[in-house]
Image (cartoon, helix red, strand yellow):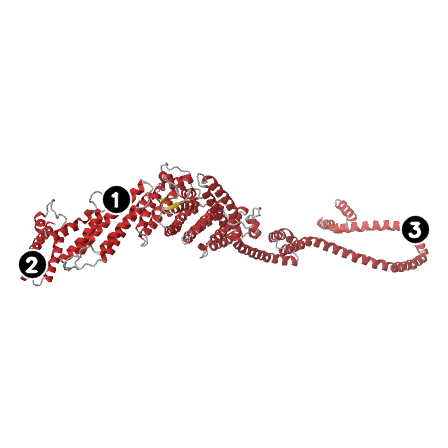
């Protein structure tokens, strides 16, 4: 019991000192202690309360007087308080009235402060939006002035930098939706610009190519001029050099006329065409990630344009302008491609341009091969060659391989030679037609110098003669010689600037000259010789002409060597075949002389009118035969009286005259023999034989009169030996001797063939029967008839024996 009292004191102390909110645990400890502890605590608590009440009472008693004094003081100030209240109320009213204006102003200030804050917020937001709007405005401006590449860059900045900051606003959403549309619009516009560029470049390709080729042409002209003046200008006639140079100048001027003679500025493709659409479109598509699509489209369109450019006009081969326009377009096309190759990366590649060039080159070669085959004018072919050289050199300067073009030029060179041969064939024909086929008369030294300046003629014997005199050749010889030199010059002009060695040029010149001599000139000579109006005198002059032309061949070889500076002693140097050409022409002329003589003889023979049944001859030779002999005599006199300036000419003319005379006599003898043995001639009388014998005697007299000097003995008379022995056999009627000596080398009638004698004898036999109806009543006639029959039998046996032996 005594132990619990201190515990209760402690609890009471805790209750007094502890906050009422925490008294719960203390009170719980009262109930957790010993039984009846609660009652005890309550007692203790009551005691504590009484103690406190006593203390309070003591305190109040102690302070009561002070309290009473305070109340008394309070009652005293009550009235003052009422007055103060009235004053305070009045002051408050007056204060409230004065504060209403302050409140209004305060509210206005608050409202302004709110507006200020809102304005500040708006300004801050606008400061974020303004750059976006400015960029978008800049984008629109760039679109309006067609700065599409810059516009794309602006779009990229808008998307990546500006729009994300203000993406919450609706106008930004609209902008975001418009940007893809603007990109597509830019693509379409740039593609449209590219199409316009491609169309423009197609129209301006010829101008670009013409400018590029004109620059190359200046180099070509300078090199060609230098080549003519230095390499091929030595050891030539000065007058002919001037002609050649003027022709070259005319050709070069016609090949490329300078449209602006005072133009000194070198124009490039970039000066003539605005390439900015290509750059813009390439950059735009590259920025948009469609660079490959653009490259494929560009290459596809350019391939199409290449096919159009490579398609020539059907009449291109008619004029050089057609070829020039064709080449200019092609050069312009590839100059543009080369420019694109060097100023862009990846749009076109070297592989692409090489592939395109190889395709174009094959087409170009096929086109030129076809159209050049239509050219029949050598001047046009030469101008075409110059154009091809300039065309090839121009493109080679841009890095394109052109070896196949120079190979093509060798094909065109053959065609050029063919056109030259055709042209010179006409020139040769005109020269031959205009020639009078008589020796060239020279009245004085000046005329003589003019002739020998055109033709290398040398004759010491002729030089000793005084003027006037005649040169052995006719006017066509120097003209033909000059035309052959002209041909060599013309052939040389094609070989210039082909980047070939002097040896190759020399070989080409000699081959083409050989073709001219062996084919063209030879053909013209053969045709000339065959012309019906060319007489025997003209044929003899042609023979003399060909001799001089043959001798001049060595001078032509020297002429070619001087041009090319290639010695004739070089192993691979070809030789001219003029010797064989002119020899063949001489042989043909000689053969034509013999043929014309024989034809004339045949004409006289055809007018022969024998009475084969005459009883006796007229006692004189036939008129046709005398006319024939007079013709032959006058003809051979012309042969022998031709002017001969040296022994060679005399020997040549004499040989031709001798051969012609022998041929004429042999043909006359053969024609007379055939007349006797003609199968349509059935009967021949002895009188006709006698008349025929008179004619043969005249032939023999003509042969023995030496119509052409130089025959030995009776060589010419032997042409009529067959006729003479046959006629002697019938005139003498010496059949016994003929039959007895037949087959012996010493036979008097060795040249009489049994079959010939039999044919003529049977014709006489038939004639005897018809003319002597009463021959059977005369003994002599009967004996003669029997003799003829006997001889006929013997001759038949000889003929049969000959056939069996054969």
Alpha carbon distance from label 3 to label 1: 206 Å
The image shows residue 380 at horizontal and vertical percentages of 44, 51
Give the residue number, with chain letter if any, for mark 3. 66
The furthest residue to the front: 619
Q: Position of residue 353 (x, y in %)?
A: 48, 48
* Among the 4 quarters of the image, the one containing residue 134: bottom right
Q: Residue 646: where, in percent of width, then height?
A: 33, 40
Q: Would you call the spot at circle 1 few (<14 residues within 10 Å), some (14-19), or many (20 or more)?
A: few
* Closer to us: 790 or 320: 790
> Could you say which quadrant of the image residue 682 lies in?
bottom left
304 with respect to 703 (left or right): right
- On residue 383, the disc is none
Q: Earlier in the sequence, mark 3 or mark 1?
A: 3
Give the mark, 2 or 1, whose residue is nearer the N terminus. Answer: 1
| Apparent side of residue 3 relative to residue 263 in the rendered image (left or right) | right
* Quarter assignment of residue 686: bottom left
Residue 279 visible at all: no
Nearer-the-camera pick, 137 or 116: 137
Q: Which residue is mark 2?
A: 781
Labels 3, 1: front one: 1
Query: Along the polypeptide, which appears first: circle 3 or circle 2?
Result: 3
Q: Residue furthest bottom?
A: 773
Q: Whole-Å distance between the Cαs marked 2 and 1?
A: 49 Å
Residue 494 location (% of width, % of height)? 43, 46
User: CB under 8 Å between callouts 3 and 1?
Assistant: no
Q: Residue at x 29, y 47 (%)?
A: 639
Secondary structure under tag 2 reads helix
Q: Mark 1 — residue? A: 709
């Amino acid at each position: 019991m005594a132990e619990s009292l201190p515990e209760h004191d402690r609890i009471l102390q805790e209750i007094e000192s502890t906050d009422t909110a925490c008294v719960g645990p203390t009170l719980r400890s009262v109930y957790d202690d010993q039984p009846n502890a609660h009652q005890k605590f309550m007692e203790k608590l009551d005691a504590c309360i009484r103690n406190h009440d006593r203390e309070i009472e003591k305190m109040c008693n102690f302070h009561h007087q002070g309290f009473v004094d305070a109340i008394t003081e309070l009652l005293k100030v009550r009235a003052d308080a009422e007055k103060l209240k009235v004053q305070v109320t009045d002051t408050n009213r007056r204060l409230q009235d004065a504060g209403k204006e302050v409140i209004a102003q305060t509210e206005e200030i608050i409202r302004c402060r709110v507006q200020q804050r809102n304005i500040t917020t708006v300004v801050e937001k606008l400061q974020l939006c303004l750059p976006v709007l400015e960029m978008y405005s800049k984008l629109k401006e760039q679109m309006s002035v067609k700065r599409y590449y810059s516009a794309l860059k602006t779009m990229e900045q808008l998307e990546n930098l500006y729009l994300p900051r203000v993406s919450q606003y609706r106008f930004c959403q609209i902008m975001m939706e418009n940007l893809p549309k603007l990109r597509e619009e830019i693509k379409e516009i740039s593609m449209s610009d590219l199409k316009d560029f491609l169309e423009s470049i197609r129209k301006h390709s010829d101008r670009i190519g013409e400018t590029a080729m004109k620059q190359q042409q200046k180099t070509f002209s300078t090199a060609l001029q230098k080549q003519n003046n230095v390499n091929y200008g030595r050891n030539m006639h000065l007058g002919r050099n001037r002609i050649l140079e003027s022709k070259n100048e005319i050709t070069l001027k016609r090949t490329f006329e300078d449209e602006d003679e005072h133009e000194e500025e070198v124009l490039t493709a970039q000066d003539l065409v605005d390439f900015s659409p290509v750059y813009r479109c390439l950059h735009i598509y590259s920025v948009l990630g469609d660079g490959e699509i653009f490259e494929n489209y560009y290459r596809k369109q350019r391939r199409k344009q290449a096919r159009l450019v490579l398609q020539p006009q059907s009449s291109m081969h008619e004029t050089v302008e057609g070829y020039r326009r064709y080449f200019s377009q092609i050069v312009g096309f590839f100059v543009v491609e080369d420019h694109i190759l060097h100023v862009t990366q990846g749009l076109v590649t070297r592989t692409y341009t090489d592939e395109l060039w190889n395709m174009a080159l094959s087409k170009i070669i096929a086109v030129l091969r076809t159209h050049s085959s239509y050219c029949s004018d050598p001047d046009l072919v030469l101008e075409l060659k110059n154009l091809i050289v300039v065309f090839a050199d121009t493109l080679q300067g841009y890095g394109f391989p052109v070896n196949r073009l120079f190979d093509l030029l060798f094909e065109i060179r053959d065609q050029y030679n063919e056109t030259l041969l055709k042209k010179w064939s006409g020139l040769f024909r005109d020269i031959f037609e205009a020639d009078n086929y008589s020796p060239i008369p020279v009245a004085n030294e000046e005329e003589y110098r003019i002739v020998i300046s055109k033709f290398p003629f040398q004759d010491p014997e002729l030089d000793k003669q005084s003027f006037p005199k005649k040169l052995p050749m006719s006017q066509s010889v120097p003209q033909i010689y000059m035309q052959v030199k002209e041909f060599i010059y013309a052939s040389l002009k094609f070989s210039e600037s082909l980047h070939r060695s002097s040896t190759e040029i020399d070989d080409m010149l000699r081959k083409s000259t050989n073709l001219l001599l062996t084919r063209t000139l030879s053909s013209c000579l053969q045709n000339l010789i065959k012309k019906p109006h060319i007489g025997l005198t003209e044929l003899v002059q042609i023979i003399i002409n060909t001799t001089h032309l043959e001798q001049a061949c060595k001078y032509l070889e020297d002429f070619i060597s001087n041009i090319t500076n290639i010695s004739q002693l070089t192993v691979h140097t070809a030789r001219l075949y003029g010797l064989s050409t002119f020899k063949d022409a001489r042989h043909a002329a000689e053969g034509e002389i013999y043929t014309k003589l024989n034809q004339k003889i045949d004409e006289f023979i055809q007018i022969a009118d024998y009475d084969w049944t005459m009883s006796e001859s007229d006692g004189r030779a036939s008129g046709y035969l005398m006319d024939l002999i007079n013709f032959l005599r006058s003809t051979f006199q012309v042969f022998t009286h031709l002017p001969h300036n040296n022994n060679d000419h005399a020997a040549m003319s004499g040989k031709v005259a001798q051969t012609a005379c022998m041929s004429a006599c042999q043909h006359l003898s053969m024609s007379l023999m055939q007349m006797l043995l003609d199968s349509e001639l059935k009967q021949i009388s002895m009188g006709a034989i006698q008349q025929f014998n008179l004619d043969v005697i005249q032939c023999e007299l003509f042969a023995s009169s030496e119509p052409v000097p130089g025959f030995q003995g009776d060589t010419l008379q032997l042409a009529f030996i067959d006729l003479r022995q046959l006629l002697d056999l019938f005139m003498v009627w010496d059949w016994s001797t003929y039959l007895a000596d037949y087959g012996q080398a010493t036979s008097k009638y060795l040249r009489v063939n049994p079959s010939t004698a039999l044919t003529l004898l049977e014709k006489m036999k038939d004639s005897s029967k018809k003319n002597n109806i009463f021959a059977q009543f005369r003994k002599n006639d009967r004996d003669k008839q029997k003799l003829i029959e006997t001889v006929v039998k013997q001759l038949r046996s000889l003929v049969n024996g000959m056939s069996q032996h054969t």
